[in-house]
Amino acid sequence: MTLDANMPLQEINGRIAAVRKRLGKDLVILAHYYQNINIVRAADFVGDSLQLAQSASRQTDAKYIVFCAVSFMAEMARMLCQPHQKVFHPDLAAKCPLAEMAVISDVERAWEFLKGTGRRVIPVVYVNSRADLKAFCGKNGGFVCTSANAGKAMDFVLSQGAVPLFFPDENLGRNTAHTLGIKDDEMFLWEPYTDMPKTDPSPIAGKKVILWRGFCYVHVAFKPSDIDDVKRTHGNDIKIIVHPECVPAVVQRSDYVGSTSFIKSTVEAAPPGSRWAIGTEINFVNRLRDDHPDKLIVPLKEWGCREMARVTPLRFLEVLENIVNGKPQPEVAVDPDHAKYAKIALERMLAIT
Ligand code: 13P
Ligand code: SF4
């Protein structure tokens, strides 16, 4: 059913609460930290992508899981929850552009080349990716990782004497490798959109990590000059904390780097009166600021994720009322073959976390 686009927010929130009451334990709502405050308030669990994966795998009782984030995260929930459960997403068109920067045909082309070099390579795909790429990792001894455990995944691969093929986010891969002491000249950047070597193995000789040219348009918007600006306004002692999808030049000038849950716990644990500039999605930064009036919390720059914002309170209400009205949709579906192998890569991730 299509709802009145001009419905007042108060009515939307009231109707959301009514559906939640009516469905009780049959319904679980999972939301990413980057979601709008009205979605976050209605959610049973709010987390970063790793916490949401862990939560989805534990939801064994609810009949319906409504997942509020970008759609690949809802696919991940579909793969990790029970077969009898149904997963819904308020707008399946909410696709993360970073996830679209690696497609299976390009990854297979890279893989064929790498196999021919004689190096042992293990694929590590960032959770912001299509299901067929997660399946590719499952089939080839690889992992899924999130920003919270990319270091563990990369370290595990290196400890096996292998080279991680890390895709699709170059910055997360590079920043993670830096934290493991790996230098830029020990990394090889695979350029999926240019003519890469087809047979000559010399470009990757001695390289410890293979990265993929992909990026998050939200996080690459933060620049070193934003750090200068914020220090000019708030003083040099303000702490800078950023997400690892930011470019290395920003990460290297920051005091802390980590996943969304790391940012949240670090700021929460800081003493009253502490001062923070945060480089990540604006909904999350604004909520941290509102929840901690005893600290100064400012965004490094006001910058939001348009795809996360596709989950509006109205679309969220629509999906909830569709369940109540016996016409549940839009339902999240994953090709069963992709799901089978992707789940292996996701479970490997959960096992090393
Ligand atoms: P987290 O792993 O911190 O949840 O990040 C997901 C994401 O999409 C960041 O842009
Ligand atoms: Fe994708 Fe970036 Fe949005 Fe995260 S913030 S969902 S990586 S576009």
Image: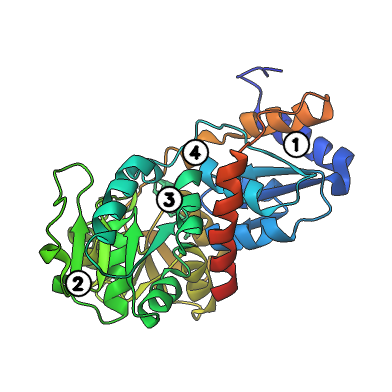
Left or right: where 94 falls relative to 248? right
How many residues crowd mark 2 within 10 Å: few (<14), some (14–19), many (20+)? some
Residue shown at 24%/60% (left/top)?
116
Give residue 309's mark.
Answer: 4
Q: Earlier in the sequence, mark 3 or mark 2?
A: 2
Residue 201 seen: yes
Does label 1 or label 2 sit earlier along the sequence? 1
- The three-letter amino acid code for the residue at tag 1 is Ile
Gap between marks 2 and 4 measured at Cα: 39 Å
Amino acid carrying label 4: it is Ala
Residue 317: give x, y in percent of width and height. Answer: 70, 31
At x 49%, y 79%, the residue is 270
Residue 9 percent coordinates (x, y) = 65, 31
Query: Identity of the amino acid at label 2?
Result: Lys
Cβ(mark 1) to ligand 2 < 8 Å? no
How packed is label 1: few (under 14 Cα within 10 Å), some, or many (20 or more)?
A: many
Q: Marks 1 and 2, how far apart in space?
A: 52 Å
Front disc: 1 or 2: 2
| Mark with earlier residue (1, 4) | 1
User: Would you say residue 353 is visible in this rendering?
Assistant: no
The circle on residue 207 is 2
Alpha-carbon distance for marks 3 and 2? 36 Å
Is 312 rendered above or below residue 31?
A: above
As helix, strand or loop, the secondary structure at mark 3 comes to helix
| CB contact under 8 Å: marks 1 and 4 | no
* Residue behind mark 1: 16
| Contact between labelled residues 3 and 1, with CB atoms less than 8 Å apart | no
Of labels 1 and 3, earlier in sequence is 1
Up the image or down, 109 lies above or below 149; here it is above
